[in-house]
């Protein structure tokens, strides 16, 4: 339902904040009120002046999606403002073209300053960035092509008789991941890369095809992990999911209980990492004093994001890394 009164107030307020020079129009003498004139907004949007005046006066027909998009561009609305414009006009906001892969500088700083394993994934489960604490768990992905950093591909490449599939917890994790992917599929309709990923997985794995056919939908949330690391031993932690709202990315963080044996292991890994100057390469953890030196990602196939990395995709032992992104 269109909220005509709010739509009129919002358009008037957004128009008043713009100067002609900001939208490429010449300054034309003194103005009695700040901002653009109504006829200027109509000109920029490619609609009639009378139609736009009726919108600001809460009169006339309900504006179409095309008109809303044009007015949003004319008023230089931000993403949040454009979404608000559509909603008060009684329309669903336009969907984004596809998952955002750009990592902001603040996200990289956040990762580098965490003393627990953490990495960033986009909506399609491509790992975009990681900190050095995560290397013993996901390997040194700097040695892996960007096209092969997808967690779901790793998972469903495993043969049906692989050890992880014998664990109910691993199966539940896989099922919830597929349900989350279906939610993403609806969030980015028609996105070629996402459609190609789903098509590939349907042909690659009968298990994925079965789970996809169940049509479960569930946005990814945090969960508790109990794992046996082949080098670090028994570990237990909460796997928290922190959403970056303006990019639809997620930071996956391994959070142990304070004072627990897992917290002690994580602290030892953190202590073994040599601090690096901003922007410099940093030494990967040498795991001094703890088991796990030279952990290879191929040994991690039974748990975590490296589940299902086949032997053919085994990575070398971690080499010097810092937070990376796939730009």
Image: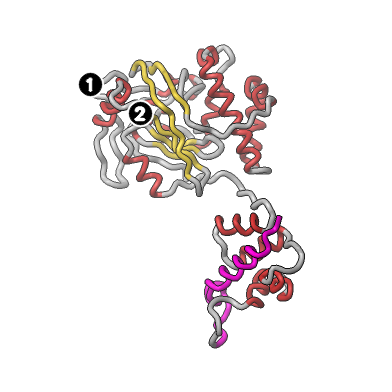
Relative side of 309 to 272, left or right:
right
Q: Position of residue 286 (x, y in %)?
A: 27, 27
In this rendering, does residue 286 appear at all?
no
Residue receiving disc 1: 289
**Which residue is at the far bottom?**
29
Q: Helix, strand or loop at disc 1? A: loop
Specify the label residue 71 is tagged with: none
Picture coordinates of residue 17 (x, y %)? Answer: 52, 71
Q: How far across and how far down the image is residue 85, in percent?
A: 62, 59
Tell me what residue is drawn at x 55 percent, y 87 percent: 29
In the displayed structure, 146 sits above or below 259; it is below
CB under 8 Å between callouts 1 and 2?
no
Q: Name the outermost residue toward the right.
A: 61
Query: Hey, which quadrant is residue 281 in on the image?
Result: top left
Q: What span is in magenta?
A: 1-29
Q: Quadrant of residue 289?
A: top left
């Amino acid at each position: 339902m269109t909220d005509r009164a709010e739509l009129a107030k919002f358009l008037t307020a957004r128009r008043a904040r713009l100067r002609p020079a900001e939208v490429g129009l010449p300054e034309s003498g003194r103005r009695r009120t700040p901002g653009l004139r109504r006829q200027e907004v109509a000109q920029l949007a490619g609609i009639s002046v009378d139609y736009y005046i009726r919108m600001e006066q809460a009169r006339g027909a309900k504006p179409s999606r095309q008109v809303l998009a044009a007015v949003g561009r004319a008023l230089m609305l931000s993403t949040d403002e454009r979404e608000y414009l559509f909603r008060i006009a009684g329309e669903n906001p336009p969907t984004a073209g596809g998952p955002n892969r750009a990592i902001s500088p603040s996200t990289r700083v956040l990762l580098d300053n965490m003393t627990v394993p953490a990495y960033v994934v986009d909506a399609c489960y491509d790992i975009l960035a990681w900190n050095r604490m995560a290397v013993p768990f996901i390997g040194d992905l700097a040695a892996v092509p960007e096209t092969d950093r997808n967690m779901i591909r790793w998972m469903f490449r495993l043969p049906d008789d692989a050890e992880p599939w014998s664990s109910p917890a691993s199966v539940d994790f896989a099922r919830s991941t597929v349900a989350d992917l279906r939610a993403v599929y609806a969030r980015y309709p028609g996105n070629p890369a996402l459609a190609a990923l789903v098509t590939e997985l349907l042909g690659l794995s009968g298990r994925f095809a079965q789970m996809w056919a169940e049509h479960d939908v569930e946005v990814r949330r945090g969960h508790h992990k109990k794992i046996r690391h082949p080098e670090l031993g028994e570990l237990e932690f909460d796997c928290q999911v922190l959403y970056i709202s303006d990019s639809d990315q997620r930071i996956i963080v391994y959070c142990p209980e304070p004072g627990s044996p897992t917290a002690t292991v994580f602290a030892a890994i953190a202590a073994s990492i040599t601090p690096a100057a901003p922007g410099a390469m940093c030494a990967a953890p040498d795991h001094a004093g703890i088991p796990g030196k030279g952990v290879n990602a191929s040994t991690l196939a039974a748990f975590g994001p490296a589940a299902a990395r086949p032997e053919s995709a085994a990575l070398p032992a971690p080499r010097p890394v810092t937070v990376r992104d796939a730009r």
